[in-house]
Image: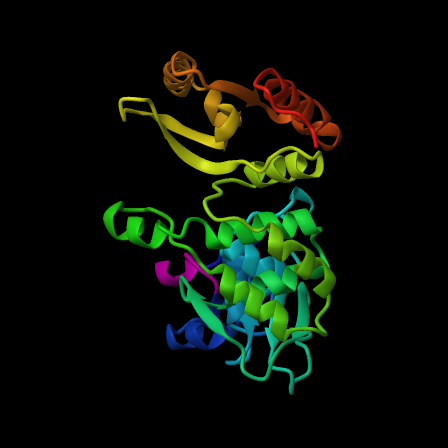
Amino acid sequence: MTRTPRPLPPLLSARPFHVHEAFAHDITPSRLRAADLEQPFPGVRVAKTLPATLENWCRACSLALPDNAAFSHLTAAQLWHIPLPRRYEQTLPLHVTTPNEQRPLRLSQVSGHRGRSALATHSIRGLPVCSPVDTWLGLARWLTCDELVAAADYLICDPLAEVAATIVPGHRRPLATQDQLAQAVADGSRMIGIRQLRAALPLIRPGVESPRETQLRLMMLRAGLPEPEINTAVFDSAGRLLGVLDLFLRAFRVGIEYEGAHHRGPEQFAADLRRYERFTASGILVVRIDAPAMRDDGAEAVARITDALLSRGWRPN
């Protein structure tokens, strides 16, 4: 009959741990070989009951990393919450970068890379992670130009966000500036994906709140439509706030709203209805775009926005 392993101390069962830490808690080598523990990396143990999240995998891997290594590329992007295409949202392999003078790390479930001699690293909940700028540069080997723009839009967010973050609890701070991204591209003429990065730079805009907003704006520009203002607070003639529009073509009084899943809830639906009524009463035509309209390179979305602009006097050049 198989014996039930002796329970681990709560501190060790709640997170990955190194065998040296286990020995300090008087855990025996035979207990560390029990079937309820996994051995994902050399010298590391993880209770099988622990969820296999990206952060837990990173915590386990960090116990086997040299001091000067950092999570990078797609893994760093997820830790920074940079938006990625669904095809790259998988947890494994973990991407880890070591300084250029060292050989890339070779571990199971890890993709090793070599970076600059002095990596610019940050700590995210105790994990060593490459800087937001270096992370964005590293994504160029996988992402399209549009996807790089969406990632950069997330990093720079709104120039006023730094001020707002000191006033509104939980408000997201910018992780980089456009100047920092531009300088990094200028300094990295021989890096992988440099053409994609150079093409993305002039398309980056502050104030974007979602990848769909970036995608829709780029679709409009490619179709020859005017460039919209982004997340603009709109007021009526008396100075009263009507609401904020995702995209706004002020000269033609046309607003564009992308409606994701969160707009379907009853409270949000009611709030949206009141907001759209205020816009209509002030002479603003709002084009509401959903996910199906974005298919086929946004043909339907672009057609609906074009029709709205034509009805307001816009003419193609």
Q: Nearer the viewer, residue 59 or 45?
A: 59
> In the rendered view, would you say 170 is above or below 133?
above
Q: Main secondary structure of the magenta part?
A: loop
Is 192 included in the stretch rendered in magenta?
A: no
Question: Where residue 130 sits: x, y (%)?
Answer: 53, 68
Quadrant location of the C terminus in the rendered image:
top right
Q: Which residue is drawn at 54% across and 21% down?
A: 288
Q: Which colour scheme is used?
A: rainbow
Residue 216 visible here: yes
In terms of depth relative to the viewer, which is nearer, 81 or 213?
213
Q: Can residue 107 be seen in this view?
A: no
Q: In the figure, is residue 101 to the left or right of 159?
A: right
Over which residues does the magenta segment extend?
7-16
Q: In this view, does 157 lie to the left or right of 305?
A: left
Q: Position of residue 28 (x, y in %)?
A: 47, 73
- Residue 14 in the magenta stretch? The answer is yes
Residue lying farthest to the right in this orientation: 296
Work out whether residue 301 or residue 124 is closer to the camera in this orientation and state it: 301
Q: Which residue is drawn at 70% across and 38% down?
A: 222
Residue 188 position, x and y percent, is 65, 73
In the depicted structure, whether residue 284 falls above or below residue 102 = above
Q: Position of residue 189 (x, y in %)?
A: 69, 73
Residue at 65% x, 87% y: name it.
101
